[in-house]
Amino acid sequence: MELVTEAVAGRRDEARHCAWCGRRLPDGGRIGRPRRYCAQPCRQRAYERRAAVQRGGLPEDAVVLSAGELADLQDRLFQLRCAAEDVATAAADGAARAELRRLADELVDTARGLERLR
């Protein structure tokens, strides 16, 4: 029983993000079902997307991206690869610990930006 309550408490401590726009959800501490969206417009856009997917005959778990969203995702993936290559190159060249730390922090920031799909 202790492991279950620790796991639930750990999930509550994790930052949650809006299922539509990716913004961080406020720490509610409310009782009940956790929020999925930051605001009503995000909830509405998600509903519209689900309805459009159902009308189009796509499976429910299909991900639909516009050309702009796909280009943005590809750009962010390229930035992540470049940041990882910078860390690898600096390590191979024997860079100082402070420089490696700075590059690793940039890599983490780039990866966090990539987590947001929209």
Image (cartoon, rainbow, N blue to C red):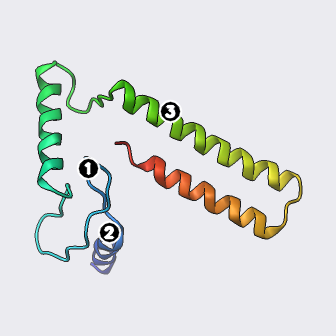
Quadrant location, the N terminus = bottom left
Q: What x and y, as percent, mark residue 18?
A: 26, 54
Secondary structure category for the residue under label 1: loop
To which residue does mark 2 refer?
Answer: 11
Disc number for residue 42: none
Amino acid at the residue labelled 1:
Ala
**Which tag is nearer the camera, tag 1 or tag 2?**
1
To which residue does mark 3 refer?
Answer: 74
Give the residue displayed 77% in from the left and 64% down from the top.
99
Residue farthest toward the bottom in the current orientation of the protein: 2
Q: What x and y, as percent, mark residue 76?
A: 52, 41
Q: Taking 25 as reference, is 92 left or right? A: right
Q: Tell which circle, 3 or 2, labels the residue nearer the N-terminal end.
A: 2
To which residue does mark 1 refer?
Answer: 19
Q: In this picture, is 72 found above or below 19?
A: above
Q: What x and y, as percent, mark residue 60?
A: 20, 31
Relative depth, front residue between 13 and 7: 13
Give the residue displayed 69% in from the left and 64% down from the top.
102
Q: Within 10 angstroms of label 1, few (less than 14), some, or many (20 or more) residues?
A: some
Amino acid at the residue labelled 2:
Arg
CA–CA distance between discs 3 and 2? 30 Å
Q: Tell which circle, 1 or 3, labels the residue nearer the N-terminal end.
A: 1
Name the image quarter holding residue 78: top right
Q: Within 10 angstroms of label 2, few (less than 14), some, or many (20 or more) residues?
A: few
Q: In this picture, is 97 found above or below 110?
A: below
- The reply to whether dot 3 and dot 2 touch (C-beta < 8 Å) is no
Secondary structure category for the residue under label 2: helix
Q: Tell which circle, 1 or 2, labels the residue nearer the N-terminal end.
A: 2
Q: In this picture, is 54 found above or below 99?
A: above
Q: Within 10 angstroms of label 3, few (less than 14), some, or many (20 or more) residues?
A: few
CA–CA distance between discs 1 and 3? 20 Å
